Image (tube, rainbow, N blue to C red):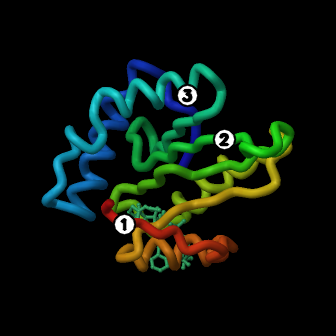
Amino acid sequence: VSIAEARLPEELPVLRRMMEDYLAEFDPGEDAATLWDDEYYRACEAGVLAGTHSIAFAREGAEAIGFLITRVETMWYRQSSQIGHVEELYVKPKFRRRGTGRALVAWASERFRRRGIQTATASVLRENQAALGFWQQLGFEIKVHYLFKPI
Ligand SMILES: CC(C)(COP(=O)(O)OP(=O)(O)OC[C@H]1O[C@@H](n2cnc3c(N)ncnc32)[C@H](O)[C@@H]1OP(=O)(O)O)[C@@H](O)C(=O)NCCC(=O)NCCS
């Protein structure tokens, strides 16, 4: 498996297709075109241009078999302090449990470290226990309960 940054905008459709498969797997009732619409992908591209976001593909041969989107956030109370978020991570089902997810996260972590970032985060939907197991296996610990309420 090789990991490299996506070429934008040419490879946006490849990303979009995998995002749609990701959503279909977890929330078949949800419409990918509404959740991850053009605005979402424009924001990704703008973030990559601004240097806050990275989009990377894991490839086996020419086939993209997984991706990761990261975002670097500057702490609102301290400009010198940054945190690296893994916003999205996905490996195509038939390529799972072969170390690709781990390799994508290692790739992102190395890039975070090179920017002087010392902490990475990931968010997992409560019902996605498999992904929680994955992150914990990689050494991530639950530090915060993130609460939501429709108001
Ligand atoms: C989560 C995901 C990215 C993992 O990718 P992957 O390439 O299969 O992961 P790896 O092979 O690198 O797994 C590394 C370790 O994590 C753990 N792990 C991976 N998948 C797991 C699962 N389903 N259940 C429990 N532990 C798991 C294992 O310990 C694994 O090591 P092992 O195979 O040697 O036991 C992949 O399952 C996926 O795309 N899921 C759907 C999308 C998703 O949930 N994304 C994360 C949202 S936050």
**Which element carries disc 1, helix, strand or loop?**
loop
Task: Tell me which amino acid carries mark 1.
Answer: Lys
- Cα distance between the residues tagged 3 and 1: 28 Å
Per the model, the C-alpha gap separating discs 2 and 1 is 26 Å
Query: Looking at this view, is 36 or 57 the one in front?
Result: 36
Q: Does the residue labelled 1 lie within 8 Å of ligand 1?
A: no
Check residue 149 in the rendering and tell me which mark sits there, or answer none: 1
Tell me which amino acid carries mark 2.
Answer: Val
Image marks 3 and 1: residues in contact by CB distance under 8 Å: no
Residue at 80% over, 47% down: 117
Q: Name the residue under label 2.
A: 72
Q: In the image, is residue 48 above or below residue 76?
A: above
Q: What element carries label 2?
A: strand
Residue bearing mark 3: 47
Q: What element carries label 3?
A: helix
Circles 2 and 3 in contact, beta carbons < 8 Å: no
Q: Residue at x 36, y 66 (%)?
A: 149
| Left or right of 40 in this view: 109 | right
Q: Which residue lies furthest to the front in this view?
A: 151
Q: In the image shown, does 97 or 120 lie closer to the viewer?
A: 120
Q: Which of marks 3 and 1 is nearer the N terminus?
A: 3
Residue 40 at x, y percent in the picture: 37, 33
Instruction: Give the quadrant of residue 139.
Output: bottom right
Which residue corresponds to the image point at 38% horizontal and 30% vertical from the top-left?
41
Disc 2 or disc 1, which is closer to the eye?
Answer: 1
- The picture places residue 124, in percent across and down from the top left corner, at 47, 67
